[in-house]
Amino acid sequence: GAVVSQHPSRVICKSGTSVKIECRSLDFQATTMFWYRQFPKQSLMLMATSNEGSKATYEQGVEKDKFLINHASLTLSTLTVTSAHPEDSSFYICSAPTGTDYEQYFGPGTRLTVT
Amino acid sequence: GNSVTQMEGPVTLSEEAFLTINCTYTATGYPSLFWYVQYPGEGLQLLLKATKADDKGSNKGFEATYRKETTSFHLEKGSVQVSDSAVYFCALPLNRDDKIIFGKGTRLHILP
């Protein structure tokens, strides 16, 4: 079946540094990908919609300059957390629609810890 | 607008107990409905789905029936196992290739 991968699975960084998270669709093309953030024991919060070849669409309250999204190809979207702070520590998950039956496949998530 | 409401957890059951997690939705038209499961430390996996009214989705012993008259998609399992401990999300896709509306998730603990 369709697979979405994320890299890295875990990352620890220091305050003030930037971290890039990759989301790849492994056996299908995705013109659209979604980025979610999940706080401990809470639901997923949609951050933005990543659009191949154009600007990302951000949800209300999500800082565009803080969370940079680039969708450079039909199989890769990246989320860069710029000038990270401890409050950015979270579990970040991406997803991509497969184009059939409204399904989306989710990546395994990236655990970001900012110290 | 479109929304999903599911029962809040955590839900704690003993092994082999019967499970129901309620989910109701508000939507225009006749959307597909999904249940996703998230095991500890992992991403989401599609558990089951239904694409039209009266459809029953099933997988791994779990079932959910798309009930248009009650706008519900309750998740059930007749005999739960410890390995079913996870967070379950009811979900409503808005359109093909569009974002998904998730319920808040229900954490399930199964005791041996």
Image (cartoon, coloured by chain):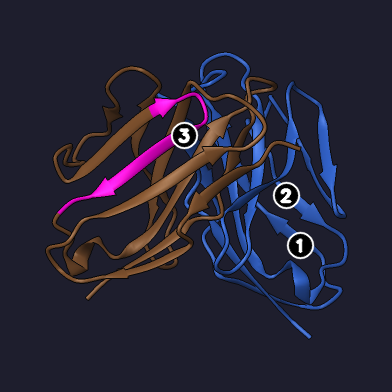
Residue denoted by label 3: A76
Q: Position of residue B100 (x, y in %)?
A: 50, 33
The chain containing the residue under callout 2 comes to B
Residue holding disc 1: B19
- Residue at mark 1 shares a chain with residue at mark 3: no
Return the mark for residue B75.
Answer: 2
The type of residue carrying mark 3 is: Leu
**In the image, is residue A68 above or below residue B12?**
above
Name which residue type carries label 2. Leu
- In the image, which residues are magenta? A72-82
Chain letter, brown in picture: A
Q: The chain drawn blue is chain what? A: B
User: Is there CB contact under 8 Å for labels 2 and 1?
Assistant: yes
Question: What whole-number distance in Å separates the C-alpha atoms at marks 2 and 3?
Answer: 34 Å
**Residue type marked 1:** Leu
Q: Nearer the viewer, residue B14 or A70?
A: A70
Q: Nearer the viewer, residue A36 or B54?
A: A36
For image coordinates 56% across by 47% down, the residue present is: A5
